[in-house]
Every structure is written in C-alpha cells, then in structure tokens.
Image (tube, rainbow, N blue to C red):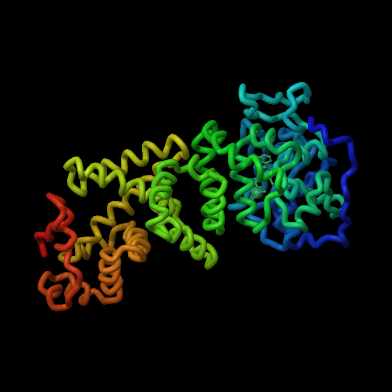
Amino acid sequence: MDSTRSNSLPVVIPRPEHNISRANISPNAVKVLYRLREAGYRACLVGGSVRDLLLGREPKDFDVATDARPEQVYKLFRNCRLIGRRFRLAHIQFGQEIIEVATFRAHGDDSEDGDGPSVERAADGRILSDNVYGSIEDDAWRRDFTINALYYDIDNFAVLDYVGGMADLKAGLIRLIGDPAQHYHEDPVRLLRAVRFAAKLGFRLDPATEAPLHRLGHLLEKIPPARLFDEVLKLFLGGCAIQSFELLRHYRLFGWLFPATERCLHHQQHHYPKTLLVRALASTDSRLAENKPVQPAFLFAALLWEPLREQMRRLEAEGLDEHEALQEAAEQVIQTQIRHTALPRRYSLPMREIWELQQRLTVTTGKRALRLLDHPRFRAGYDFLLLRAEADEQAAELADWWTRLLALDTAGRVQATQPAAKAKTGKPRRRRKARSRKGDQAAQPAPEA
Ligand code: ATP
Ligand code: MG
C-alpha cells in the first residue's frame, strides 16, 4: 500500500460546483449506473470520461466502477459478458456501445489478501494479474494519474477526489499517483500513457512524473507486443499523432516501439527537415479532425517506410531487382517489427499493398494502368504517393500524372493511357525511372496497350 496514503475522506465536489451533467453522459452508461444503484451497489463513472467531461471534452467511452463483484454485475444485466484475466471486468453491450464495469480494486500489494484471486507479479515487479478487490478509495489509489482517478457518484451527482485530481486538472498537470518509478516498473505501459495524455490534453508532466521517463523506455521490452500495438494505435490514431510522436522521441521512448524507424530518423535528421512520417502523422490528425476515416495500415506503411527503403537499397545492391527487393524487404521489416509491436495480418497485408502500389503506380500506360484504378487499395496507395511527392520530385511528377488522370472521364482516361497520347501531352515517362530497373515486370510497357 502506498505510504503517503492514510484512510482519508475524499474531497467532495457537490453537483452545483462542477459541470458534469447527466445530459452529457451516454444514456447507456446512465442506465448501468442506475441499475447498479437500485440493486444496492455503489456506482460511479470513473477514469477518462469524468476527466473529459470536467474539461468540457467529449469522452471516448464511459467506464463504470462499482463495489459489485463481476459475477454480481453479470446477474443484473442480460447483455453482460465477463472478460479479462489481468483485470476481470464486465462488459455491458448496447448495440455498438460497450459500457465497461470494473469492481473497485486495491493497489497491487502482495501481503494483502482480498477474497478475489490475488495479485500475481513477475520477478521484475510487473503486475501480471490484479484482481484484489477493495474500497473505492483503494481503487482511486491504484489508478495511474491523478486526473484519471476522479469519480462521479450517481448517488448524489458529486465528484469524489481522493488523490488531488481536481487541482491537477485545473493546473493542466499529468501526475502519477504515488511513487513514479515504482508505478512505471509495475506497469511500463504507463510511460506511454503519460505521453499520450500529455499530447492529447496539452498538459504538462509533473517533474517527478517526467524525470524517470527518459531512462525507463527499456522496460517496454517486457510488454507483450499485442499490448504495445494497442497503445501505438491509441497514440497515433487519437487525433494528436504529431504531439505524441514528438514527445515519444523527446523521452526516447519511440525507439523502443519502432527501433528500425528510430535508426533511420537518427541518421537522417540533418537531411530531411520533415520526413514522410511526420507528414503522414499530420495528415492523420487533420483527417480525424474532419471526421474522415483513417487506416492503421496507412499509418504503419508510413512508420515503416524508411526502414523498408533502406532494406530495399541493401537488397538491390546485392543484385535483386526492385520487385524482388520490395517483397523481401517487406518481409524482413515486418518480422523485425512484430518483435516489438504486434502487427496483425489484417493491417500488414494492406500495408504491403500500399508499398507495392508505389511500384505499380509507375506504370502509366495501357490497361494495366487503368486497372490500377479499381485496385481495392488504389486510394491509399495514391494518397501515400501524394505524401511522398512532397519531398521527392520524381514522386511529385508521378502523383501529378495520377491526379490529372483521376480528373478525367472514362474516355479521357483511356486516351491518356495510350502510349501515343503520352508523348504528345508530355506526361512523365516511366522510362526515366524504369531505366535503372532490371527485369521489373511492373515497369514494362503493358503488352495489351
Ligand atoms: P481514454 O480517453 O484514452 O479512454 P482513459 O483515461 O479512459 O483515456 P483507459 O485506458 O480507457 O483510459 O482506462 C480507463 C481508466 O482506467 C483510466 O482513466 C485509469 O484510471 C485506469 N487505468 C487504465 N490503464 C491503467 C494502468 N495501466 N494503470 C493504472 N490505471 C489504469
Ligand atoms: Mg477510456
């Protein structure tokens, strides 16, 4: 148990003194809170939703904390599933929306014996399983940051603050609860969470929370790749990818997630003021700001583009043609990456297609070129080419050509891809690029043209 903590009463912020209104809470979450309360349990909104509501932001999801045990929650809701090993949780499903209900837990203290399953630790102090139930106050103290440990109590609509979260929220501070180094060791993902919340909320890191960040990145090596993959998506698809990326690099955490990319960035930093990666992250942020969809595959294609190119150059120097080099390099880059973050095939396959399209889009004559327009990944491949175009003249010429083609009607497109038409309109000729290639099928003039 944390030494700074005594059995203390929370600071209670009564309803008139805060801005959380039930009108801003998901009706399903309100339903869950009331159902629990009517069954005689305590029920509070907690975590990101309370934090975001207090900040006047729209919460991503609504998490509920209660003194009901998972099995008791299960009995109250028909649409309930129990999940999780590390944390046993109840998921209440309402169509697309899931309300997560967690039982109050105590901090992972080994000497304590809750009557749930006990805390399980790795030799290095990481908590592997954390199912010791406790009071609401215990629950507050085992959370990560003070601003994430505020409770909105459905009983009286007050906000309960055990850890000084309100003051930090007002001051714009990310502060770990308890001893920072110990907290990072217990769950190194908190290193990434600290960065993510700082980026997302535009908050500063409290000095004691910040100090260990620079030197603890290595702890991430012990985190399962699947969990790091989830965190990476949250970091880069949360609308603040640029800030997240800059903070990750600043605290020397990025290299523990993407070592091959970090090496390329390190070598290139004097040559490329703005890498393709930074442009991809910026475009991801602006798409999200406009409520447009974003693809993890596109993001990973950009994250791993420089390592891919470096590997391709190496393989081409060994005598592989461009096509073979891409296939081989893609395989190697993916195999290296999945030792750090997972990369499920549903993302790595389209990622490879986006890369392959960078070669295939160099064909600008014949039906082969026209057919590319129907390729399921054409749009992503073309968008990727546009990003490359910002720093690469040859890619820029090619991107312009495809942009002009897209502006034409069907007849115009057929015309534009005739070999003869190309000479007249002075469109970029593949030959310039193709000359250096040996035996690349995709670069040969299409026989049917
Ligand atoms: P987001 O807006 O990204 O969902 P969040 O704060 O809700 O942010 P979640 O990952 O949804 O983050 O977690 C919900 C809450 O659970 C957190 O606010 C925090 O109180 C607690 N929590 C989550 N992960 C950890 C962790 N690794 N260690 C301690 N507490 C955690
Ligand atoms: Mg959340």
How many numbered marks appear?
0
Residue 431 found in image quarter: bottom left
Residue 83 locus on image (x, y percent): 62, 35
- The image quadrant where one finds the C terminus is bottom left
Q: Residue at x 23, y 44 (%)?
A: 325
Q: Residue furthest front?
A: 270
Residue 378 locus on image (x, y percent): 32, 60
Residue 388 locus on image (x, y percent): 34, 61
Ligand 1 location (quadrant)? top right
Say if 253 sits above or below 369 in the image: above
Residue 233 locus on image (x, y percent): 52, 49
Say if 131 sits above or below 377 in the image: above
Left/right of residue 104 with respect to residue 423 in the rendered view: right
Say if 225 sits above or below 381 in the image: above
Looking at the image, can residue 34 be seen? no
Q: Residue at x 75, y 34 (%)?
A: 105
Residue 144 found in image quarter: top right
Q: Residue at x 17, y 46 (%)?
A: 321
Of residue 343 and residue 124, the one placed in the foreground of this image is 124
Left/right of residue 214 with respect to residue 156 in the rendered view: left
